[in-house]
Image (cartoon, grey):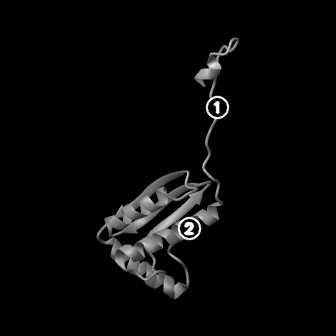
Amino acid sequence: MMVVSKIQGVRGVRDEIEVAAPSIPDRKLKAELDEAIIRTAYERLGRPSKAPTGICVHVHSGVVTLSGYIADPGLAMAAHAVSASTVGVKSLHDKIEVSPDASLMTEWTSRADSSTGLSSVP
């Protein structure tokens, strides 16, 4: 920009270039994040690869919100790190709450899910 401003007759220079992150459809980004968080839970806690983690992922226009109640603060940090480093995530809102009672809630939810066929990870 400095070179351009030295050209005779140039009165000012405005830099309006923006670098945009790659655009990934919300549904695909959510699926990638769900899988990455489950894989992280498996590696960290030894959970079965399809076990609910208690973490919900919501994506809207590349803006990711993590929410839920979990007992392991390390898993909360790992889920945040995995999400923040995933290509296509434009911003991240981490609303995960860590509570010792959360493991009971996750266990109850997974039992209810198996009886209803519903998933605790929307």
Q: Which sits in the foreground, 108 or 77?
A: 77
Q: Name the residue under label 2.
A: 32
Q: Which residue is drawn at 70% across and 11% down?
A: 9
Q: Looking at the image, is 10 positioned above or below residue 43?
A: above
Q: Looking at the image, is 12 positioned above or below residue 74?
A: above
- Where's residue 61, x and y in %? 62, 54
Q: Is mark 2 on a helix, strand or loop?
A: helix
- Where's residue 34, x and y in %? 52, 69
The quarter of the displayed image where residue 82 is located: bottom left
The quarter of the displayed image where residue 2 is located: top right
Q: Which of the image's four quarters has the C terminus?
A: bottom right
Badge 1 or badge 2: first in the primary sequence: 1
Pick out the residue farthest to the top.
9
Q: Which of the image's four quarters has the N terminus?
A: top right
Q: Is mark 1 on a helix, strand or loop?
A: loop
Q: Residue at x 43, y 59 (%)?
A: 80
Q: Which sits in the foreground, 33 or 107?
A: 33
Q: Which sits in the foreground, 52 or 84?
A: 84
Q: Which residue is drawn at 33% across and 70% down?
A: 71
Pick out the residue farthest to the bottom.
115
The label number, if any, that marks residue 35 in the structure image: none
- Where's residue 6, x and y in %? 62, 16
Q: Mark 1 points at which residue?
A: 16
- Where's residue 104, x and y in %? 34, 77
Q: Identity of the amino acid at label 2?
A: Glu
| Contact between labelled residues 2 and 1, with CB atoms less than 8 Å apart | no
Q: Which residue is drawn at 51% across and 64% down?
A: 57
